[in-house]
Amino acid sequence: MMKRLTPVLFLMLALLMVSTAAFADTVAGKAQGAFGGGTPADSATLSLGGGSLKYTGQTYTGDTMQTGDLMPLGTFHLNTPFASGTDSTFKLHLIFSAPPSAPATDFTADVDAHIFFWTGYLTIDFAAAPTTVHYVTPDYNGSFDLAIDDITLGTLVGLSCDKTLQADITNAVPEPAAILLLGSMLLGVGIWRKKRA
């Protein structure tokens, strides 16, 4: 009985390894930003009463399997002092060069935030729910969530005027094409077992 099960167990282990490897994708690309509905660029500036808020984008690299490993997506710098500010918006524009897409072109994602001004500080508030990014590679489909940390900048004690924008990659999951591939493999194992019986 064990001799009959050994090939099946080996195939099941191989399938598990393939399915795990399929979603351990490198995430890489370039981050850009824009304030108040502008066109995303490598750097953007929002004028404030007596000062300004500047975003500087950067390239980034992460991994869909490294949950908790924060990925930097640029920096914010608050020029002080600022007397006032009108609530505004910020758009983070991500241009992905990896995972490799199909066809071979970069894919993008936009994440919106609201900027709220208070006495002596401001908050850049990204949506509480993570942003789901879908992609298609030459071999399979996939998706992952980007959970982006909110930013608070200001002149109050304990606050900084410089902050790095960070994101956590979570919930890397297969999508229909990958599920179909795994299902086909399992069906093949079933047929093989039936023929052996």
Image (cartoon, rainbow, N blue to C red):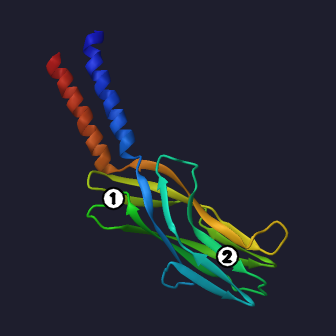
Q: Residue at x 39, y 47 (%)?
A: 23
The picture quadrant where one finds residue 135 is bottom left
| Amino acid type, label 2 | His
Compared across the picture, whether 71 is left or right of 187 comes to right
Residue at the spot of label 1: 100
From the top left corner, tell me how far across and down residue 30 is, in percent. 46, 68
Q: Nearer the viewer, residue 22 or 79?
A: 79
Circle 1 residues within 10 Å: few <14, some 14–19, many ≥20: many
Residue drawn 35% across the image and 50% down it: 175
Give x and y (percent) for residue 104: 27, 64
Label 2: few (<14), some or many (≥20) within 10 Å? some
Q: Does residue 16 appear left or right of residue 34 in this picture?
A: left
| Helix, strand or loop under label 2 | strand
Where residue 124 appears, as percent x and y from the top left, is 66, 72
Q: Residue at x 37, y 42 (%)?
A: 21
Q: Find disc 2 in the rendering and name its residue.
A: 77
Tell me the amino acid under the disc marked 1: Pro
Considering the numbered disc 1 on the image, is that residue within a helix, a strand or a loop?
Answer: loop
Image quadrant holding the N terminus, namely top left
In the rendered image, the vertical position of residue 145 relative to residue 20, given as above or below? below
Residue 34's place in the image compared with 59, above or below, is below
